Image (cartoon, rainbow, N blue to C red):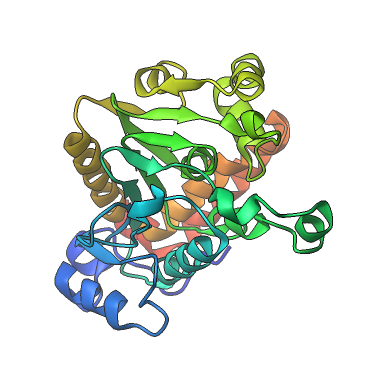
Amino acid sequence: MALTGGMRRPFVATRVFTKRRTAASVHRAYSSAPGSSYENLLVRAPKPGVGLSMVTTDHGSSVTLNRPRALNALSTSLFRELNDALRQMDDDKSTGAIVLTGGEKVFAAGADIKEMTHLTFSEAFNSNFIASWSATIPGVRTPLIAAVNGHALGGGCELALMADIIYCSTTASFGQPEIKLGIIPGAGGSQRLAKAIGKSRAMEIILTGKNFSGAEAGQWGLAARVFDTNDSCIQGAIDTAEKIAKMSGVAVKAAKEVVNKSQDLPLRDGLEYERKVFHSLFGSRDQKIGT
């Protein structure tokens, strides 16, 4: 992890936009960049330093999972575009945080059944089917906030679970209904959901295919915040992303890395790893400015 060189000052005007670019100029940069004209996605930045990735049914904004007729059903081609868009945002030094959101009624309704109906074991195994869905997002170093309104089912729930922070509204509905199709979650649902809400609750949800509400997501610790309306959920996520984007870029990436390590390492190893990263930040320019 590079902690020196290319440090961004911990203030929005100078750290997030070294050339003082506006949100509109960032929108143009994304929109005109090679490879950012997508069939299923649209890209924009709602505020300085914030990349907004919208799963929505209109053409109003961002990295938009734009399949309204299929209820934003997830497919390999859509994830290929989403992964590309997120890589561009992650590589853009002016983007300090990313928001992933969706329509009022559907965040993402799960995998496109048409893509799986005639798939054989040999084809699924040899093509490593849906591996690409979770190949990029876990490696994105820029914090990702999922703002969930409406249904987030199957792959849609798994997509939300890949985010660093989940915000949802009271209209949100989560679930892993794959068991009803004779399969199981295949993009991390069984692993991430169990870590987020505990084995027993995850087991019940996955074995029965039952959904759970946004309120329950908040009570169980899956969602960091639950909002009364869809608009306040999205706005809350954007506001939080803006706050993150104002912080030291190197410290934010380090903080995300050590928290994620807590999910993989035993406590003793995690504490040692955290301390080493903590010490390394004393070599950064941002730390000198901050103190």
- The quarter of the picture where residue 239 lies is top left
User: Looking at the picture, how far across and down is residue 32, in whole percent?
Assistant: 29, 83
Farthest-out residue, front: 118
User: Looking at the picture, how far across and down is residue 257, in whole percent?
Assistant: 55, 49
| Depth check, front residue: 247 or 140 | 140
| Depth check, front residue: 110 or 52 | 110
| Depth check, front residue: 261 or 135 | 135
Does 135 appear above or below 107?
Answer: below
Residue 20 appears in the figure: no
Quadrant containing the N terminus is bottom right
User: Looking at the picture, how far across and down is residue 45, in whole percent?
Assistant: 24, 63
Residue 186 appears in the figure: yes
Horizontal arrangement in the rendering, residue 8 relative to residue 178 (left or right)? left
Residue at horizontal 57 percent and vertical 53 percent from the top: 114
Residue at horizontal 51 percent and vertical 59 percent from the top: 140
Does 3 appear above or below 30?
Answer: above
| Depth check, front residue: 36 or 262 | 36
User: Looking at the picture, how far across and down is residue 104, in whole percent?
Assistant: 25, 39
Residue at horizontal 51 percent and vertical 39 percent from the top: 161
Horizontal arrangement in the rendering, residue 276 relative to residue 238 (left or right)? right
- The quarter of the picture where residue 105 lies is top left
Does 264 appear above or below 65?
Answer: above
Numbered label tally:
0
